[in-house]
Amino acid sequence: MLITADDIRKHRSVSLNLDDEKRLLTYIDEAEKLDIMPVIGVELYKDLHDNPQNHDLLLNGGYYDGEKRYCIGIKAADALLSYARFILNNSVNATPFGVQRKNALDSESVDDKTLYRHSNEAKNVGMAYLQQCVDFITFNTNSCGQHKKEIHQRKIRVIGE
């Protein structure tokens, strides 16, 4: 994986008492495999994972093209896309008695419409960040030129709520 749970916490508020392995890492893996890899290509994704030192700007963001352009970085995109997946499923647990929504005495459930709006907002920001990364890859042939042919555009349309 390209990020950790702490990378998500840099961009959105997530409780520190969550079991990261059980709750967050699944969504990070899904976001990378289903949202990021199809856009940047398997070859570049693998290279980012295996050789992060060769792709600091793409991973962590920064200015390029003589500081005329900015890329926030794949890690930020990954964090928000992972968070968007996590937030929809965080309170849902599969139990021997069926799928249950976790409730506690000191908390109040958010209605589904608010939850979807919050998740869609994070996903839209994550996809915009990912587009900045695609723009960087397309422009910058010095650090990623061999992967240029692998870039694919993917459009997602939300239907209904």
Image: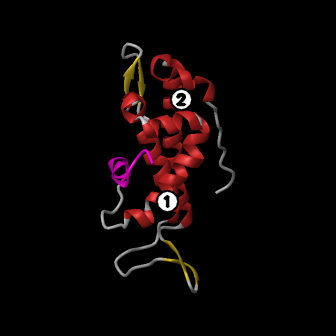
| Residue placed under numbered mark 2 in the picture | 134
Q: Is residue 29 visible?
A: yes
Residue 118 visible somewhere in the drawing: no
- Queried whether the magenta region covers residue 7, the answer comes back as yes
Residue pointed to by mark 1: 26
Circle 1: residue type: Thr
Residue 140 position in % (x across, y down): 48, 19
Number of disc labels: 2
First reached walking from the N terminus: tag 1 or tag 2: 1
* Left or right of 128, for residue 106: left
Give me the residue at 53% from left, 43% from top.
Answer: 124
Q: Is residue 33 above or below residue 134?
A: below
Q: Does 33 sit left or right of 19 as displayed?
A: right
Task: Kindly identify the residue that appears in the image at 68 percent across and 54 percent down.
Answer: 160
Report if the CB atoms under discs 1 and 2 are less than 8 Å apart.
no
Figure quadrant of residue 51: top left
The amino acid sitting under disc 2 is: Val
Q: Nearer the viewer, residue 127 or 5?
A: 5
- Residue 38 location (% of width, % of height): 61, 40
Instruction: For the C terminus, give its image quadrant.
Output: bottom right
The span picked out in magenta is: 1-12
Residue located at (43% from left, 30% from top):
58
Does residue 130 sit above or below 28 in this rendering? above
